[in-house]
Image: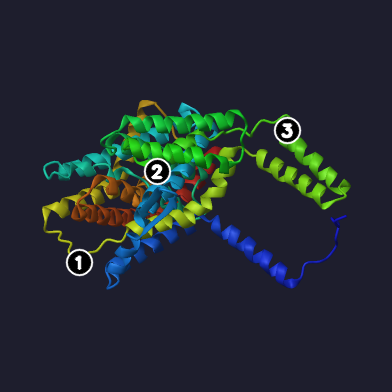
Amino acid sequence: MPNLSSNRLPNRASIVTKRALSAIEGFLHIEALSGIILLVAATAALIFANSKYISLYEAFWHTSLGFNFGHFNLSWDLHFWVNDVLMTVFFLVAGMEIRREIHEGALANFKQAALPIVAAIGGVCFPAIIYLSFNLNGGHTYGWAVPTATDIAFALGILALLGKAIPSNLHIILLSLAIIDDIIAVLIIAFFYSTDLNPSGLAIASAGIALVLFFQWIGFASAWLYIAPGAIIWWGLMVTGVHPSLSGVVLGMMTPVFPTRHLVAPLTMLNNAVKSLQEKNTVKDLHHTLKKVRKGQRDIIAPVIRVQKALHPWVAYGIMPVFAFANAGVSFANFDLSSNKSFFIVLGVIIGLFVGKPLGIITASYLAVKSGLCRFPPNMTWGGILLIGFLAGIGFTMSIFVSMLAFKDVVQLDSAKIGVLCGSGLSAFIGLGYGLFYIKKHKKYMINFNKENND
């Protein structure tokens, strides 16, 4: 019988290893770290694109990668794999975040969601208007949505750098606003940047959705089983002409928010399995019991939480930095700001992000509060809303993603990317600086507020 009660003490090497792995795990949950890695990846891309290795950088991302299944050949370049395949996982995590917030978070009821919803709408409309005001007569109007997006990871990363002195309500509103911003971005991509729609693809995507619902109905709980219907939805959207990575949002929004139902409750299954561990006499019995333990452990947590937690580190520290490294490489060699073709695109994107975002968020929030449509949560001030506005101006990965859909001309695309990098950089720099000022001002506000309440 296997010895389950062995008292062997771990050696020094295993202790050091466990501590190191624990430290790494804790390090990976620091929100500021993901923003720093994104910045490093984007900087590396810019360095490569403006060095003697630019040809190597471009050739690498145009390298073909594919598979052969008998007579069926599937081959795309690395750029496509990153932007259309890997980003599906990013949108899957975003979709699950939206699903969770709608179920039990900041979007669970209208009163709770009113302020970030209104602020997000203002933060989308104002940048678009500013961009169009510069490019209405230049034939570059198709890029109006580029400065409307917000990079959740980068914005929250900058906020995390400010420390615990930032009120929790401010963090929640920024997260909610960024999520709503993502919903709007998804709708914009689906309706404005999906051309030559092929209705036959909708039938394929619908078949994938039906297969997901069938799997959920018969009780399939393993996330791996949903890769096949997810791939069908992805292929259907690509055939339709809608950006295929949006299939991730569809899957994310369909992910169950309740634990899988079983004849035996997962907690009961875990209790029974733990009790029976001492009674098993063979390795086969022990293996069967441990399998039940893993199954109960999996099924006790809602899939929308379990899958999101599992994928989040891969997205934050893998997919998004790779996307930034693949798409932030803009060469300045042939860039000419004296050309209207470039200048007004750059100007529209920079001002749209840096000025339009905070202006739109502040204006929309002010009108909503004064009209009685919504009210501030406790400890929230207009200074906090302004800080949210600056941080929401960090478009980065999402804005770059939209610019790639908006512009096919290389010069226009590079101009939009430069505008995104400059506008996002300014927003991050000013947001961080203003955040430090806000912390001091908020401390004085809280001291006076507490004095008034005590009196």
Residue 365, which numbered label? none
The disc, 1 or 3, on the residue closer to the chain's N-terminal end is 3
Element type where label 3 sits in the image: loop
Q: Nearer the viewer, residue 325 or 150?
A: 325
Mark 3 surroundings: few (<14), some (14-19) or many (≥20) residues within 10 A: some
On the question of residue 24 being in view, the answer is yes
The residue labelled by disc 2 is: 245
* Kind of residue sitting beneath label 2: Ser
| Image quarter hosting the N terminus | bottom right
Q: Nearer the viewer, residue 381 or 255?
A: 255
Mark 1 surroundings: few (<14), some (14-19) or many (≥20) residues within 10 A: few
* Kind of residue sitting beneath label 3: Ala
The residue labelled by disc 3 is: 265
* Kind of residue sitting beneath label 1: Ala
On the question of residue 440 being in view, the answer is no
Element type where label 2 sits in the image: helix
- Whether residue 107 is situated above or below residue 273 in the rendered picture: above
The residue labelled by disc 1 is: 333
The disc, 2 or 1, on the residue closer to the chain's N-terminal end is 2
